[in-house]
């Protein structure tokens, strides 16, 4: 009987976390609707990452760096690619989160506000990008096709753990004047307090947008196929429209995730409900674990 009571208690606790996390996601979406300028941060970030990718891919293919396997030179190129990509992504994420925090406090942030905040944290951002690049290369090596299934599975599990443990790094970097290592430690500490909302928010937002993206791609492929019967040019036009739609979904997801992390961090640290989240009964959301 006590065992059954324990299971019921655990089930109720998880239901409350799901419900609370969903409310947080909805409130984050409301913030995004009230300030669509926040979408510009992931949009510009995406364009910059494409530039970085092209900068690396052209010489890699031209010089055939990976023709004879990865090797030391390939590992160095891989690290530099990860470092540059992470530097761009983290910089724009910091700008987004900084602007989102201003909005959560009732302000009206501009692009310049976000970029100024990110520029002030540039040394810490580059330091954390180096850490993330090192971890990224290591995880990619574990998930390599040449490894056996168990090693690849371990690599995937470590990747999920790393994502959860670092979810609060950007809000910490934005809010505190500390280095990348301390920011990582703070993020891990906050994970212990917000593990449910952290995991559910990460998985929930990713899964929801993953399903929507899959549905859009499926419909787009079907319509493009039908359009091809009438005209190849029409099919190409339909495909382009749906590709743009998928990219816009990715931009919206990135912005929503940034706002969610900002709100989660703000409440976890200050225990004060942001103006945009008033009335959501969040007072019990992040009570210290006993």
Image: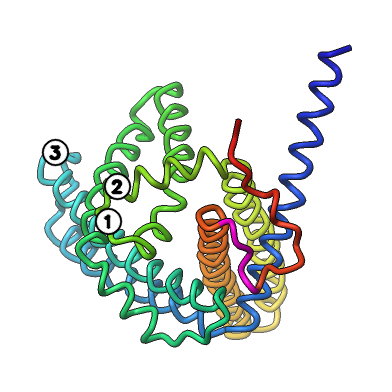
Observer-nearest of 221 and 192:
192
Q: Residue 182, which numbered label?
A: 2
Question: What residue do we see at 58% from left, 83% from top?
Answer: 35
Q: Is residue 214 above or below residue 99?
A: above
Quarter occupied by the C terminus: top right
Q: Which residues are magenta?
A: 271-275
Looking at the rendered image, the disc whose residue lies closer to the viewer, 2 or 3, is 2
Q: Secondary structure at mark 3?
A: helix
Within 10 angstroms of label 1, few (less than 14), some, or many (20 or more) residues? some
Residue 244: percent from left, percent from top: 55, 77
Within 10 angstroms of label 2, few (less than 14), some, or many (20 or more) residues? some
Residue 246: percent from left, percent from top: 58, 70
Please say if the residues under marks 1 and 2 sit with CB atoms less than 8 Å apart. yes
Direction from residue 227 to residue 271 in the image, left or right: left
Question: What residue do we see at 33% from left, 29% from top?
Answer: 146
Q: Secondary structure at mark 2?
A: helix
> By what rule are the colours in the image chosen?
rainbow
Instruction: Name the residue that disc number 3 marks.
Output: 71
3 or 1: tag closer to the N-terminus: 3
Instruction: Name the residue that disc number 1 marks.
Output: 178
Question: What residue do we see at 49% from left, 72% from top?
Answer: 101
């Amino acid at each position: 009987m006590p065992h059954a009571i324990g299971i019921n208690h655990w089930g109720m606790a998880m239901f409350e976390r799901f419900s609370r996390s969903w409310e947080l996601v909805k409130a984050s979406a409301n913030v995004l609707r009230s300030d669509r300028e926040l979408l510009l941060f992931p949009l510009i970030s995406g364009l910059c990452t494409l530039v970085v990718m092209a900068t690396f891919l052209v010489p890699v293919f031209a010089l055939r760096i990976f023709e004879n396997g990865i090797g030391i030179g390939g590992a160095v190129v891989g690290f530099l690619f990860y470092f540059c990509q992470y530097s761009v992504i983290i910089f724009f994420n910091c700008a987004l989160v900084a602007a989102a925090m201003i909005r959560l406090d009732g302000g009206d942030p501009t692009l310049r506000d976000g970029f100024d905040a990110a520029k002030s944290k540039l040394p810490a951002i580059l330091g954390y990008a180096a850490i993330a690049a090192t971890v990224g290369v290591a995880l990619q090596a574990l998930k390599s096709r040449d490894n056996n299934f168990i090693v690849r599975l371990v690599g995937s599990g470590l990747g999920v753990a790393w994502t959860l443990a670092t979810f609060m790094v950007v809000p910490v970097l934005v809010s505190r004047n500390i280095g990348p290592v301390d920011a990582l430690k703070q993020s891990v500490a906050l994970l212990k307090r917000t593990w449910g909302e952290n995991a559910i928010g990460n998985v929930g937002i990713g899964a929801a947008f993953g399903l929507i993206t899959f549905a859009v791609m499926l419909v787009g492929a079907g319509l493009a196929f039908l359009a091809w019967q009438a005209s190849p040019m029409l099919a190409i036009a339909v495909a382009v429209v749906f590709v743009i739609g998928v990219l816009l979904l990715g931009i919206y997801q990135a912005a929503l995730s940034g706002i969610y992390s900002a709100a989660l961090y703000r409440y976890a640290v200050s225990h004060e409900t942001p103006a945009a989240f008033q009335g959501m009964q969040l007072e019990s959301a992040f009570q210290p674990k006993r």
